[in-house]
Image: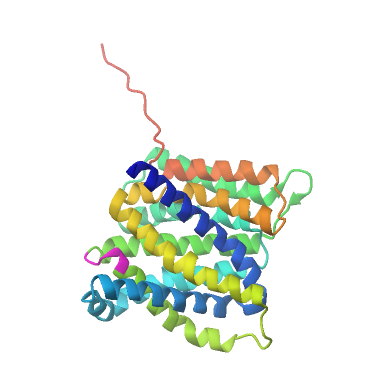
């Protein structure tokens, strides 16, 4: 029964995070990347802050005490990458963004190798090559050459670099803080960092009800509830199982985009996505390449 509950929560988390690209595509053209991300973070701050307040009120002091660390995590894990994805959604389809977003663990492993001195196995190196090859496959059409604008793809990859950097910052400096405290604090400081940029780029014309409802869903479900569910899965099942949502998220991003935005399902999307996911599995150690050992007579 517990296994069934875990599978359901994992699928729910992947479905919610996979839908975020679709809702950004709906809301961002009318509201703007910075205001959209700011509103999303404010909503998430209220939800996660309330959870921290009612479960462990003393943690609120830690959010204020560790403001510098949480601000660094806010910028690298939320404010900057969320804003970049909101901008990229003006150019790329949901499925493509979901696949590119899945490369975040690869950058985490790469940054941990150069910064934290963690070991990089031959299997991980193969995974990095395959992951970036898969992204290249999304760009190239065998008949006509480049089929996507490379600039939004590079911006999306830079958002994933920030996710990887945030993971390493958290591992190096935030081990004493509870995950929910980090989540609530990072959303709070993301809101503060984004405030001036959101005010400077606030839309002059009133947005549609569809854009506002998409923004509300991004804040409530894709940020507030999703972060709560993610850290609940970590507490109950461990980080390795919780991270398996990365493999399901692109599939849901493709599904929602096709169902609700009439995005085309192309063969190269599935092939490139499969290569990216294989690369992630190798890089993160989910799939291991075993070396043959020769016995000496």
Q: Quadrant of residue 270?
A: top right
Q: Quadrant of residue 292?
A: top left
- Give coordinates of residue 9: x percent, y percent: 42, 52
- Give coordinates of residue 7: x percent, y percent: 41, 45
Q: Residue at x 51, y 58 (%)?
A: 16
Q: Residue at x 49, y 43 (%)?
A: 279
Q: Does residue 105 appear left or right of residue 210 in this picture? A: left
- Give coordinates of residue 138: x percent, y percent: 65, 49
Q: Nearer the viewer, residue 186 or 17?
A: 17
The answer to whether 131 is drawn above or below residue 209 in the figure is above
Q: Nearer the viewer, residue 42 or 145?
A: 42
Q: Does residue 111 appear left or right of residue 30 in this picture? A: left
> Would you say the magenta stretch is mainly helix, strand or loop?
loop
Q: Residue at x 47, y 53 (%)?
A: 12
Count all numbered tags in the image, as a single digit.
0
Q: Is residue 33 magenta?
A: no
The magenta-colored residue range is 176-180
């Amino acid at each position: 029964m517990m296994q069934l509950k875990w599978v359901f929560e994992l699928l729910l988390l992947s479905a919610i995070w996979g839908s975020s690209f679709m809702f950004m595509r709906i809301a961002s053209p009318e509201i703007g990347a910075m205001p959209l991300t700011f509103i999303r973070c404010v909503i998430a701050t209220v939800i996660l802050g309330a959870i921290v307040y009612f479960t462990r009120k003393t943690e609120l002091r830690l959010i204020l005490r560790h403001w510098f660390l949480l601000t660094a995590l806010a910028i690298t894990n939320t404010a900057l990458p969320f804003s970049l994805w909101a901008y990229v959604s003006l150019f790329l389809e949901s499925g493509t963004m979901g696949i590119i977003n899945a490369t975040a663990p690869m950058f985490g492993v790469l940054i941990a190798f150069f910064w934290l001195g963690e070991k990089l196995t031959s299997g991980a190196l193969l995974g990095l090559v395959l992951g970036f090859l898969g992204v290249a496959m999304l760009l190239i059409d065998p008949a006509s050459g480049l089929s996507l604008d490379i600039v939004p793809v590079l911006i999306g990859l830079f958002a994933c670099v920030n996710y990887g950097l945030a993971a390493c910052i958290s591992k190096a400096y935030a081990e004493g803080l509870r995950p929910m405290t980090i989540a609530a604090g990072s959303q709070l400081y993301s809101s503060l960092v984004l405030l001036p940029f959101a005010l400077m780029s606030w839309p002059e014309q009133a947005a549609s009800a569809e854009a506002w409802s998409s923004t509300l869903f991004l804040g409530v479900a894709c940020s507030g509830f999703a972060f709560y569910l993610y850290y609940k899965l970590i507490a109950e099942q461990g980080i390795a199982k919780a991270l398996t949502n990365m493999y399901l998220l692109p599939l849901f991003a493709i599904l929602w985009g096709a169902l609700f935005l009439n995005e085309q399902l192309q063969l190269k999307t599935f092939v490139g996505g499969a290569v990216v996911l294989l690369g992630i599995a190798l890089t993160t150690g989910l799939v291991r390449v075993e070396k043959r050992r020769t016995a000496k007579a």
